[in-house]
């Protein structure tokens, strides 16, 4: 929205008082960081997530449907601090070699 001086207004990214989700994401649980390709769970976010910094940078993404699976489909990896998951690719499978087996 233009102001009389031709400047753009910056919309504040307030927190909804009754919820811990930012107003832009009051109906979303997951938000992605386009810079790091990490997805955050807003319901379980911690200080390590730095959600305020992410929203201030305007480098975020919402997913439809709002699910961790959809975020992964779009190439985002779960942020360990808030999703409780590590990595984002295929699960690591332990393998054994013939050197690992005692005979």
Image: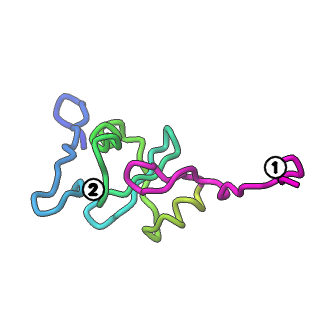
Question: Magenta span covers which residues?
Answer: 75-103
Q: Position of residue 78 (x, y in %)?
A: 49, 53
Residue position marked by numbered label 1 in the rendering: 100
On whether residue 101 falls in the magenta region, the answer is yes
Main secondary structure along the magenta-highlighted residues:
loop
Q: CA distance from mark 1 to mark 2?
A: 53 Å
> Which residue: 42% across, 57% down?
83
Q: Between residues 29 and 45, which one lies in front from this camera angle?
A: 45
Tag 1, which secondary structure?
A: loop
Q: What residue lies at 46% left-to-right and 52% top-to-bottom?
A: 39
Quadrant assignment, res 56: top left
Comparing 81 with 60, the one in front is: 81
In the displayed image of the protein, which residue is found farthest to the front? 103
Vertical placement of residue 33 versus 65, above or below: above
Going 89% across and 51% down the picture, which residue do you hit? 98
The residue labelled by disc 2 is 24
Please state the horizontal and vertical placement of residue 80, each as a whole percent of the image.
Answer: 45, 49
Determine if the magenta segment contains residue 76: yes
**In screen coordinates, is 14 left or right of 29?**
left
Please give left or right for residue 56 compared with residue 20 in the image.
right
In the rendered image, the quadrant that contains the C terminus is bottom right
> Of 69 and 84, which appears nearest the observer?
84
- The spot of residue 66 in percent (x, y) is 43, 68
């Amino acid at each position: 929205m233009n102001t009389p001086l031709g400047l753009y207004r910056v919309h504040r990214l307030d927190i909804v008082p009754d919820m811990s989700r930012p107003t832009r994401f009051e109906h979303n649980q997951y938000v992605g960081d386009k810079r790091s390709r990490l997805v955050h769970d807003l319901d379980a976010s911690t200080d390590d997530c730095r959600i305020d910094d992410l929203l201030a940078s305007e480098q975020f993404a919402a997913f439809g449907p709002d699910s961790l699976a959809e975020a992964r489909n779009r190439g985002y990896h779960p942020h360990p601090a808030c999703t409780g998951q590590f990595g984002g690719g295929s699960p690591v499978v332990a393998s054994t070699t013939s050197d690992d087996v005692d005979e």
